[in-house]
Amino acid sequence: MVTGTFYMRNVPNKLAMSMVKRKFAKQHLQQLKKQCSEAGIKLTHQRLEIFRELMSVSDHPSADLIYKRLHKKHPTIAIDTVYRTLATFDKLGLVKKLHVLKEWTLFDTNLDVHHHFVCNRCKKVEDIYWPDFDKRLLPDVVKNIGAVHSRHLEIHGVCNSCLEIKRLQQTF
Ligand SMILES: [Zn+2]
Ligand SMILES: [Zn+2]
């Protein structure tokens, strides 16, 4: 069993949150342009729109959610294009595919080392930073299996909002 402290991403207020997001999106946009030109991929208008949408949604959108939101603004966009573009972004390392839910694949735009709390009720996925865990030596048995490239911790449970709903339902 692994012990240590962990904390959720904590941003003091909404303004700071939007500033962080804007800075984050700008860095990502530069990275997108660089990676695309290096890989010889044309940065089409549609790819750019998909990327913008990806950066503007909540932390871990599914491909379907990205498509639905884009389709409202750009009715000509095809679902295939969205899926293919997301796969390209994943290959370029601009997003990470997450398989924390059985139902669908999620896309993570946060490329910093972090872990996830998955709510089994509402399917919300929250980022967790746990430097103690990241620094911790892995058990020797891992060396006998192979070389480690990365480690990712998945915590499954029920989030506080869902617990509160359940508590209210029981009260009334
Ligand atoms: Zn929940
Ligand atoms: Zn994440």
Image: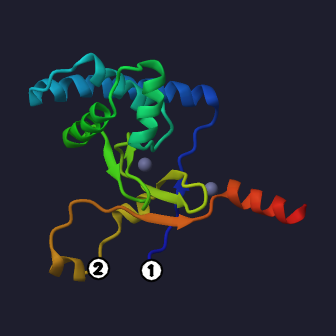
Q: Which residue is mark 2?
A: 139
Q: Nearer the viewer, residue 168 or 141?
A: 168
Q: Position of residue 3 (x, y in %)?
A: 48, 73
26 sits to left or right of 15? left
Furthest toward the right, the residue is: 172
Q: Quadrant of residue 11?
A: top right
Ligand 2 within 8 Å, label 2 CB: no
Q: Is residue 16 left or right of residue 164?
A: left
Q: Residue sitting at 76 percent across and 62 percent down? A: 166
Q: Amino acid at mark 2?
A: Pro
Q: Is residue 19 above or below residue 96?
A: above
Task: Tell me which corner region of the image, top left, top right, bottom left or bottom right, holds residue 47.
Answer: top left
Quarter holding the N terminus? bottom left
At 48% from the left and 33% from the top, the residue drawn is 57
Q: Secondary structure at mark 2?
A: loop
Q: Is residue 15 left or right of residue 102?
A: right
Q: Position of residue 45 (x, y in %)?
A: 28, 16
- Residue kind at label 1, given as amino acid type: Met
Residue 23, numbered circle: none
Residue that appears at 41% across and 53% down: 104
Out of 146 and 90, give the one closest to the viewer: 90
3 relative to 143 in the view: left or right: right
Residue highlighted by disc 1:
1
Q: Is residue 132 above or below residue 127?
A: below
